[in-house]
Image (cartoon, rainbow, N blue to C red):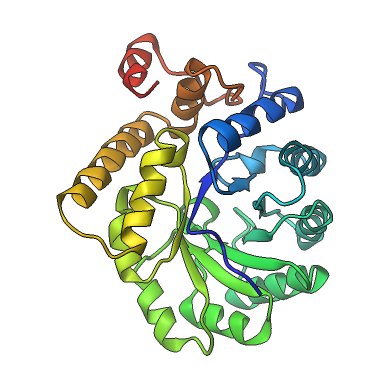
Protein backbone atom coordinates (compact mmCIF):
# COMPACT_ATOMS: atom_id res chain seq x y z
CA UNK A 1 0.00 0.00 0.00
CA UNK A 2 2.93 2.38 0.52
CA UNK A 3 5.89 3.28 2.64
CA UNK A 4 6.91 5.72 5.32
CA UNK A 5 9.56 8.07 3.94
CA UNK A 6 13.09 7.18 5.06
CA UNK A 7 13.44 10.59 6.72
CA UNK A 8 10.73 12.74 8.23
CA UNK A 9 10.94 15.42 10.89
CA UNK A 10 8.92 14.97 14.05
CA UNK A 11 7.38 18.44 14.42
CA UNK A 12 6.90 20.24 17.70
CA UNK A 13 3.54 21.81 18.54
CA UNK A 14 3.38 25.51 19.45
CA UNK A 15 1.87 26.45 22.80
CA UNK A 16 1.59 29.89 24.40
CA UNK A 17 3.65 30.77 27.46
CA UNK A 18 0.47 30.13 29.46
CA UNK A 19 0.35 26.55 28.15
CA UNK A 20 -2.52 26.78 25.66
CA UNK A 21 -2.41 25.36 22.14
CA UNK A 22 -1.42 28.20 19.79
CA UNK A 23 -3.01 27.54 16.37
CA UNK A 24 -1.96 30.95 15.03
CA UNK A 25 1.71 29.89 15.22
CA UNK A 26 1.25 26.61 13.35
CA UNK A 27 1.50 27.90 9.74
CA UNK A 28 4.77 29.73 10.37
CA UNK A 29 6.35 26.72 12.04
CA UNK A 30 5.26 24.35 9.28
CA UNK A 31 6.37 26.70 6.50
CA UNK A 32 9.82 26.83 8.08
CA UNK A 33 10.09 23.05 8.33
CA UNK A 34 8.95 22.53 4.75
CA UNK A 35 10.56 25.45 2.92
CA UNK A 36 13.71 26.23 4.93
CA UNK A 37 14.47 22.93 6.66
CA UNK A 38 13.52 21.05 3.47
CA UNK A 39 11.70 18.33 5.37
CA UNK A 40 10.53 15.70 2.85
CA UNK A 41 7.65 14.84 5.18
CA UNK A 42 6.41 15.62 8.69
CA UNK A 43 5.14 13.60 11.62
CA UNK A 44 2.51 15.77 13.28
CA UNK A 45 1.34 15.28 16.85
CA UNK A 46 3.79 12.55 17.85
CA UNK A 47 5.67 12.45 21.15
CA UNK A 48 7.73 15.45 20.04
CA UNK A 49 4.41 17.14 19.27
CA UNK A 50 3.21 16.60 22.87
CA UNK A 51 -0.06 15.08 21.73
CA UNK A 52 -1.07 13.72 25.13
CA UNK A 53 -1.39 17.16 26.70
CA UNK A 54 -3.76 18.27 23.92
CA UNK A 55 -7.50 17.83 23.74
CA UNK A 56 -8.97 15.74 20.94
CA UNK A 57 -10.42 18.91 19.41
CA UNK A 58 -7.06 20.68 19.44
CA UNK A 59 -5.36 17.72 17.78
CA UNK A 60 -7.99 17.61 15.05
CA UNK A 61 -7.54 21.35 14.52
CA UNK A 62 -3.77 20.84 14.30
CA UNK A 63 -4.14 18.11 11.66
CA UNK A 64 -6.30 20.39 9.53
CA UNK A 65 -4.13 23.47 9.99
CA UNK A 66 -0.99 21.65 8.89
CA UNK A 67 -2.69 20.14 5.84
CA UNK A 68 -4.07 23.53 4.85
CA UNK A 69 -0.60 25.02 5.19
CA UNK A 70 1.28 22.47 3.06
CA UNK A 71 -1.37 21.74 0.44
CA UNK A 72 -2.79 18.50 -0.87
CA UNK A 73 0.19 16.41 -1.93
CA UNK A 74 2.82 17.01 0.76
CA UNK A 75 3.50 13.83 2.85
CA UNK A 76 2.04 14.10 6.34
CA UNK A 77 1.83 11.45 9.05
CA UNK A 78 -0.47 11.81 12.04
CA UNK A 79 0.42 10.72 15.53
CA UNK A 80 -2.67 9.07 17.00
CA UNK A 81 -2.95 7.77 20.56
CA UNK A 82 -5.62 8.13 23.18
CA UNK A 83 -6.76 6.69 26.46
CA UNK A 84 -9.81 5.13 24.80
CA UNK A 85 -10.38 3.34 21.50
CA UNK A 86 -13.27 5.70 20.74
CA UNK A 87 -11.02 8.77 20.88
CA UNK A 88 -8.25 7.04 18.90
CA UNK A 89 -10.77 6.25 16.15
CA UNK A 90 -11.99 9.84 16.14
CA UNK A 91 -8.42 11.08 15.69
CA UNK A 92 -7.63 8.51 13.02
CA UNK A 93 -10.72 9.45 11.03
CA UNK A 94 -9.78 13.11 11.32
CA UNK A 95 -6.33 12.44 9.92
CA UNK A 96 -7.85 10.39 7.10
CA UNK A 97 -10.31 13.19 6.29
CA UNK A 98 -7.42 15.65 6.06
CA UNK A 99 -5.56 13.45 3.60
CA UNK A 100 -2.71 12.25 5.79
CA UNK A 101 -0.58 9.59 4.13
CA UNK A 102 -0.54 7.42 7.23
CA UNK A 103 -1.42 7.24 10.90
CA UNK A 104 1.16 6.39 13.55
CA UNK A 105 -0.92 4.57 16.14
CA UNK A 106 0.40 4.62 19.67
CA UNK A 107 -0.92 2.51 22.52
CA UNK A 108 -3.00 3.97 25.36
CA UNK A 109 -0.64 5.43 27.95
CA UNK A 110 -0.76 4.71 31.66
CA UNK A 111 -3.64 2.23 31.47
CA UNK A 112 -1.36 -0.64 30.33
CA UNK A 113 -3.61 -2.93 28.27
CA UNK A 114 -2.95 -6.65 28.02
CA UNK A 115 -1.44 -7.97 24.79
CA UNK A 116 -4.90 -9.24 23.77
CA UNK A 117 -6.50 -5.86 24.47
CA UNK A 118 -3.76 -4.06 22.56
CA UNK A 119 -4.33 -6.29 19.53
CA UNK A 120 -8.06 -5.60 19.63
CA UNK A 121 -7.39 -1.86 19.96
CA UNK A 122 -5.25 -1.91 16.81
CA UNK A 123 -7.83 -3.97 14.90
CA UNK A 124 -10.68 -1.64 15.88
CA UNK A 125 -8.82 1.54 14.88
CA UNK A 126 -7.53 0.06 11.62
CA UNK A 127 -11.01 -1.13 10.65
CA UNK A 128 -12.24 2.45 11.03
CA UNK A 129 -9.72 3.69 8.42
CA UNK A 130 -9.30 0.72 6.05
CA UNK A 131 -7.89 2.80 3.19
CA UNK A 132 -5.23 4.55 5.29
CA UNK A 133 -1.81 3.15 6.13
CA UNK A 134 -1.13 2.51 9.81
CA UNK A 135 2.25 2.35 11.49
CA UNK A 136 2.21 1.18 15.09
CA UNK A 137 4.23 3.00 17.72
CA UNK A 138 5.72 0.96 20.55
CA UNK A 139 7.13 3.24 23.23
CA UNK A 140 7.07 1.42 26.57
CA UNK A 141 9.14 4.08 28.36
CA UNK A 142 6.35 6.59 27.86
CA UNK A 143 3.22 4.41 27.87
CA UNK A 144 4.08 1.57 30.27
CA UNK A 145 3.02 -0.96 27.61
CA UNK A 146 5.38 -3.05 25.47
CA UNK A 147 4.07 -4.75 22.33
CA UNK A 148 5.51 -8.25 22.09
CA UNK A 149 6.95 -9.70 18.90
CA UNK A 150 4.23 -12.36 19.02
CA UNK A 151 1.51 -9.69 19.17
CA UNK A 152 3.07 -7.77 16.29
CA UNK A 153 3.09 -10.91 14.15
CA UNK A 154 -0.54 -11.56 15.13
CA UNK A 155 -1.54 -8.01 14.11
CA UNK A 156 0.32 -8.07 10.79
CA UNK A 157 -1.33 -11.39 9.91
CA UNK A 158 -4.81 -9.98 10.59
CA UNK A 159 -4.67 -6.32 9.58
CA UNK A 160 -3.71 -5.51 5.98
CA UNK A 161 -3.28 -1.76 6.42
CA UNK A 162 -0.65 -2.13 9.17
CA UNK A 163 2.51 -1.42 7.21
CA UNK A 164 5.11 -0.83 9.89
CA UNK A 165 6.21 -0.33 13.47
CA UNK A 166 8.10 2.49 15.11
CA UNK A 167 10.06 0.53 17.69
CA UNK A 168 11.20 2.73 20.54
CA UNK A 169 11.34 -0.22 22.92
CA UNK A 170 13.71 -3.16 22.68
CA UNK A 171 15.62 -2.59 19.45
CA UNK A 172 16.76 -6.22 19.44
CA UNK A 173 13.13 -7.22 18.77
CA UNK A 174 13.39 -5.81 15.24
CA UNK A 175 15.58 -8.56 13.69
CA UNK A 176 13.56 -11.17 15.61
CA UNK A 177 10.31 -9.82 14.18
CA UNK A 178 11.72 -9.66 10.65
CA UNK A 179 12.41 -13.40 10.81
CA UNK A 180 8.90 -14.24 12.03
CA UNK A 181 6.69 -11.97 9.93
CA UNK A 182 4.79 -13.46 6.99
CA UNK A 183 5.07 -10.22 4.99
CA UNK A 184 7.55 -7.38 4.92
CA UNK A 185 6.81 -4.25 6.92
CA UNK A 186 8.86 -1.19 7.75
CA UNK A 187 10.59 -0.57 11.05
CA UNK A 188 11.01 3.06 12.07
CA UNK A 189 13.47 4.52 14.53
CA UNK A 190 12.88 7.61 16.58
CA UNK A 191 16.31 7.90 18.17
CA UNK A 192 18.78 9.95 16.14
CA UNK A 193 21.75 8.97 18.29
CA UNK A 194 21.76 5.44 16.85
CA UNK A 195 20.65 6.00 13.23
CA UNK A 196 23.53 4.06 11.68
CA UNK A 197 23.22 1.11 14.04
CA UNK A 198 19.43 1.03 13.71
CA UNK A 199 19.55 0.79 9.93
CA UNK A 200 22.08 -2.03 10.25
CA UNK A 201 19.60 -3.89 12.50
CA UNK A 202 16.75 -3.70 9.99
CA UNK A 203 15.21 -0.28 10.52
CA UNK A 204 14.51 1.55 7.25
CA UNK A 205 13.20 4.98 8.31
CA UNK A 206 13.36 7.54 11.08
CA UNK A 207 11.01 10.16 12.46
CA UNK A 208 13.76 12.52 13.45
CA UNK A 209 13.97 14.89 16.40
CA UNK A 210 17.47 16.03 15.38
CA UNK A 211 16.02 17.04 12.02
CA UNK A 212 14.65 20.11 13.77
CA UNK A 213 18.24 21.20 14.51
CA UNK A 214 20.22 19.61 11.67
CA UNK A 215 17.68 18.97 8.88
CA UNK A 216 20.08 18.89 5.94
CA UNK A 217 22.81 17.01 7.80
CA UNK A 218 20.36 14.35 9.00
CA UNK A 219 18.82 13.95 5.54
CA UNK A 220 22.29 13.57 4.04
CA UNK A 221 23.26 10.92 6.60
CA UNK A 222 20.16 8.89 5.77
CA UNK A 223 21.00 9.19 2.07
CA UNK A 224 24.53 7.91 2.70
CA UNK A 225 23.26 4.98 4.74
CA UNK A 226 20.72 4.00 2.08
CA UNK A 227 23.45 4.09 -0.57
CA UNK A 228 25.67 1.80 1.49
CA UNK A 229 28.39 4.38 1.97
CA UNK A 230 30.88 3.86 4.80
CA UNK A 231 33.90 5.55 6.30
CA UNK A 232 34.82 8.56 8.38
CA UNK A 233 32.17 10.91 7.03
CA UNK A 234 29.40 8.57 8.26
CA UNK A 235 30.99 8.29 11.70
CA UNK A 236 31.63 12.02 11.94
CA UNK A 237 28.07 12.90 10.97
CA UNK A 238 26.59 10.36 13.41
CA UNK A 239 28.81 11.77 16.16
CA UNK A 240 27.67 15.34 15.41
CA UNK A 241 24.02 14.34 15.62
CA UNK A 242 24.52 12.04 18.62
CA UNK A 243 26.33 14.69 20.65
CA UNK A 244 23.70 17.32 19.93
CA UNK A 245 20.65 15.17 20.56
CA UNK A 246 22.19 13.69 23.72
CA UNK A 247 22.94 17.14 25.13
CA UNK A 248 19.46 18.37 24.27
CA UNK A 249 17.85 15.25 25.72
CA UNK A 250 19.76 15.48 28.99
CA UNK A 251 18.66 19.09 29.45
CA UNK A 252 15.00 18.78 28.41
CA UNK A 253 14.56 17.94 24.76
CA UNK A 254 11.34 19.79 24.00
CA UNK A 255 12.06 23.12 25.72
CA UNK A 256 15.56 23.06 24.18
CA UNK A 257 14.23 22.34 20.68
CA UNK A 258 11.67 25.11 20.93
CA UNK A 259 14.28 27.55 22.25
CA UNK A 260 16.61 26.78 19.33
CA UNK A 261 13.79 27.19 16.81
CA UNK A 262 12.61 30.46 18.36
CA UNK A 263 16.17 31.80 18.23
CA UNK A 264 16.09 31.05 14.51
CA UNK A 265 12.95 33.15 14.21
CA UNK A 266 10.55 30.21 14.00
CA UNK A 267 7.12 30.30 15.68
CA UNK A 268 7.72 27.12 17.69
CA UNK A 269 6.08 28.39 20.87
CA UNK A 270 6.72 27.09 24.36
CA UNK A 271 6.13 23.96 26.44
CA UNK A 272 3.25 23.97 28.92
CA UNK A 273 4.41 23.83 32.57
CA UNK A 274 5.81 21.98 34.39
CA UNK A 275 8.31 21.90 31.48
CA UNK A 276 10.21 25.16 31.53
CA UNK A 277 12.30 27.17 29.12
CA UNK A 278 16.09 26.73 29.35
CA UNK A 279 17.89 28.66 32.06
CA UNK A 280 20.19 31.53 31.04
CA UNK A 281 23.29 29.35 31.38
CA UNK A 282 21.74 26.50 29.39
CA UNK A 283 20.52 28.91 26.72
CA UNK A 284 24.08 30.11 26.21
CA UNK A 285 25.16 26.49 25.60
CA UNK A 286 22.30 25.96 23.17
CA UNK A 287 23.11 29.06 21.15
CA UNK A 288 25.77 27.16 19.18
CA UNK A 289 22.89 25.23 17.53
CA UNK A 290 20.97 28.38 16.63
Position of the C terminus, as image quadrant, is top left
Which residue sits furthest top? 280
For image coordinates 38% across by 80% down, the residue present is 176
Q: Residue 241: x, y in percent?
A: 31, 41
Q: Is residue 50 left or right of residue 96?
A: left
Pick the residue in front: 230 or 136. 230
Is residue 144 at all visible to an observer of this figure?
Answer: yes
Q: Quadrant of residue 67?
A: top right
Q: How many marks?
A: 0
Height in image: 129 above or below 61?
below
Pick the residue in front: 225 or 107. 225
Q: Residue 63: x, y in percent?
A: 75, 44
Height in image: 116 above or below 37?
below
Q: Residue 277: x, y in percent?
A: 49, 18
For image coordinates 53% across by 67% down, the residue present is 165
Is residue 12 at all visible to an observer of this figure?
Answer: no
Q: Residue 36: x, y in percent?
A: 53, 31
Pick the residue in front: 218 or 15. 218
Position of the N terminus, as image quadrant, is bottom right
Amino acid sequence: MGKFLPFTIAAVTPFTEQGDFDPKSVPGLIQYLVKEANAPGLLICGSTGEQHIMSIEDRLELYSSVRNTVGTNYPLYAGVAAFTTKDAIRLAKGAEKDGYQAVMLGFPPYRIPTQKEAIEYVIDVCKAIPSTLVFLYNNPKRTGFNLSVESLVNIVNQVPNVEGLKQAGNRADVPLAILQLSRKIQFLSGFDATIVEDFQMGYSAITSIAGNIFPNQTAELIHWIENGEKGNKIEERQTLIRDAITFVGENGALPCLKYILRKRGVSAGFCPPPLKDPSTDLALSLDKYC
